[in-house]
Amino acid sequence: MVSPRYFLAIVLGLALAFIAWGAISSSHMIFMQVSLAGQIPGAVAGLLGGFVVALVAPRHKVLLAFLTGTAISIVLLRFFLRHGIPRFDRDTLLYCWPIWLGPSFALGGYLARNLWLSSNTSLERTREG
């Protein structure tokens, strides 16, 4: 049976990612442009979202973070390519910024898993000593 913590991890991770993306994008006009600076909100949102997904998920932390990022990336790309105005005359990687959400979520999940493992090993050392 699937634990409800997986669903909670996905919902909290996506919520924090959207809040972080909105806060960073609205903080300065340079983050709303289609340039390398415009990639920063998506990357930071992915890192934070993946971090939260991995902290809340009981097992398979990095995999769940990657799958969450990939799923939201597919949904956003499908929406942008169908309803948006794709401008492929310039750099495609800048216009299709959601492709960076999957790796960003995975990196955030990896960082959270390593933080979790290091805190557990230090906790075990304090109990032994």
Image (cartoon, grey):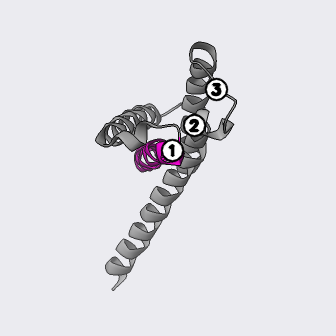
Asked which secondary structure carries label 2, the reply is: helix
Query: What mark, if any, has residue 97 been given in the picture?
Result: 2
Q: Are marks 1 and 2 in contact (CB under 8 Å)?
A: yes
- Rendered residue at 62%/28% (across/down): 74
Q: Are marks 3 and 1 in contact (CB under 8 Å)?
A: no
Categorize mark 3 by other alpha carbons within 10 Å: few (<14), some (14-19), many (20+): few
Magenta part of the protein: which range?
35-60
Of circles 2 and 3, which is in front?
Answer: 3
| Residue identifier under label 3 | 87
Quadrant of the image occupied by residue 81: top right
Of circles 3 and 1, which is in front?
Answer: 3
**Left-right relation of 19 to 74:** left
| Helix, strand or loop: magenta stretch | helix
* Amino acid marked by disc 1: Gln
Distance between mark 2 and mark 3 Cα atoms: 12 Å
**Residue 9, position as x, y percentages in the image:** 42, 38
Please tell me which of labels 1 and 2 falls first in the chain: 1
* Amino acid marked by disc 2: Trp
Q: Are marks 2 and 3 in contact (CB under 8 Å)?
A: no
In-front residue for pair 14/58: 14
Query: What mark, if any, has residue 39 been given in the picture?
Result: 1
- Rendered residue at 43%/61% (across/down): 116
Please tell me which of labels 3 and 1 falls first in the chain: 1
